Amino acid sequence: MPQTDGTTSAFDAATAVTRTGDGGLVADLDPGWDVGGGVLNGGYLLAVAARAALAVSPHPHPVALSAGFLAATGPGPASLAVTPGPAGRTLAHASVVLAGAAGPSLTAQVTTATLTDAPPEWSAVPRPSATPVDDCLAPDEVAPPDRGGQVGLRTHVQTRLDPLTSGWVRGRPGTEPVVRGWLRLADGRDPDPLALLLFADALPPTSWATGRYGWVPTVQLQVLVRALPAPGWCLAEARAGEVAGGWLDEDYRIWDATGRLVAQSRQLARAPR
Amino acid sequence: MPQTDGTTSAFDAATAVTRTGDGGLVADLDPGWDVGGGVLNGGYLLAVAARAALAVSPHPHPVALSAGFLAATGPGPASLAVTPGPAGRTLAHASVVLAGAAGPSLTAQVTTATLTDAPPEWSAVPRPSATPVDDCLAPDEVAPPDRGGQVGLRTHVQTRLDPLTSGWVRGRPGTEPVVRGWLRLADGRDPDPLALLLFADALPPTSWATGRYGWVPTVQLQVLVRALPAPGWCLAEARAGEVAGGWLDEDYRIWDATGRLVAQSRQLARAPR
């Protein structure tokens, strides 16, 4: 998707997949999309995997993507092994295995179809009341006070956290593992289904909202894309349903600038100590 | 899991996987677990896929399973191609492809680990008020009035629907796509993580609650198993979040007899016309 000025967006460049001479697909994973420690963001990797599935699909959009995170993925060259499944007029299936120098690190099932922005017939997922974007925290306020330094992800995904769920940023954690914020690509590219895959893992961990600032590695993540998003900011809200036995789930709901539900995700992650 | 009388439960027999001479895994899919039209229930197939993953795992329980339903699966011999992923002390990954005579029909990523029944550290998913099981609908009242005949699934999964969400069974559909009911294996086998995979797709479609009685094929389904269930009935509640563009999501939450959350699932399905 070229920008209106004819340039390629940083997101499109960083998630590009290329067909090699022998028919395989490869990507050059960009070190700038990290979440610290040289580890790339899960949502960024989902967008790369979805592009690989779209390369073999008659349909233009990911509607459902389920990923297993086998290992942390670092930057650099990666191969994308795609196994096409049945493809019909309504939808197509594909399995994707992303492998870097250290071997396979992500497996994904991707269902592709054609999404629209037609209004829902029925919805029980209204956009919550949220602080207007201009009254939210500044884009550099996305980490607990004792954590220095921005991670690469935040330079690419502009994140304006709702102060109502972000006391922890200023040293006042709450009791609920809920984080809400407005998201958009920092390069000005408007959201589309691929960007929604990125956004579905782009908020800080919900456990941070309760003052537990450890690492929260994703084990499995499913994203459903429900409609084409309108241009502008998306509002994302992440909630943990239960923390138990060293595991937690995180549920994301994402609404576009018109208030329309455009994506849902759920992940199982390891809980921080 | 032998029954207390030493016999094998119908569920365990129907989901058994066997290693062949060449090291592969096979199953004989039981025609008795159908949902009509010779199509087997999705949750039944998840349990079979999970058994295949457990056969190569050092861990005893599925904790996360994401499946893509490539095509309807009928009864008969099936192969289970398992690709083990990384396995550590906490968890192990595997990919499973189930194929019958017509080719691959289900792909699944399965994460295995060791679950406990230790109480949660935090939970926002309390069991809802539900009608006590003895005051719920009879086990044969699980279909709209114009649908004759029991499907095989119901002879194996005893289903007592809550009358509060089941007006449609008696010709009075409601406005909310919500279905709630008590579930247990009809052979008396107590629930375990494998049975929870079955239960995560065992209620009637939520669209039936609103009087739309068409076929609702699952496209992708993720199940998270959160704890070992206590013996006895489980309560399951399914809710559609949004119906739009020919798609709907269904969210399941399952609590055990003590009221503990033991599983969550979300699926994307095609909406009935």
Image (cartoon, coloured by chain):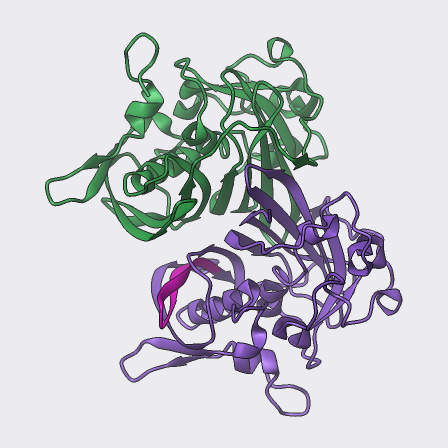
Chain colours: A green, B purple
Q: Please name the predominant secondary structure of the magenta segment in the image.
A: strand
Q: Is residue A228 magenta?
A: no
Q: Position of residue A234 (x, y in %)?
A: 55, 22
Quarter of the N terminus of chain B within the rendering: bottom right
Q: Position of residue B119 (x, y in %)?
A: 71, 56
Q: Is residue A106 found left or right of B72 in the rendered image?
A: left
Residue B262: image quadrant is bottom right
Q: Is residue A76 found left or right of B207 in the rendered image?
A: left
- Residue closer to the observer: A97 or B155: B155
- Residue closer to the observer: A252 or B120: A252
What residue occupies the far left of the structure in this picture? A21
What residue occupies the far front of the structure in this picture? B146
Q: Position of residue A95 (x, y in %)?
A: 35, 51
- Is A101 placed above or below A1 here? below
Instruction: Tally the marks.
Output: 0
What residue occupies the far right of the structure in this picture? B135
Q: Is residue B223 found left or right of B26 in the rendered image?
A: right
Which residues, given as a range, are shown in magenta?
Answer: B93-111
User: Can residue B5 be seen here?
Assistant: yes
Q: Position of residue A207 (x, y in %)?
A: 61, 37
Residue A5: image quadrant is top left
Q: Residue at x 61, y 69 (%)?
A: B195
Q: Is residue B104 magenta?
A: yes
User: Can residue A273 be seen here?
Assistant: no
Q: Residue at x 60, y 19 (%)?
A: A258
Q: Residue at x 55, y 49 (%)?
A: B269
- Is B28 placed above or below B182 here? below
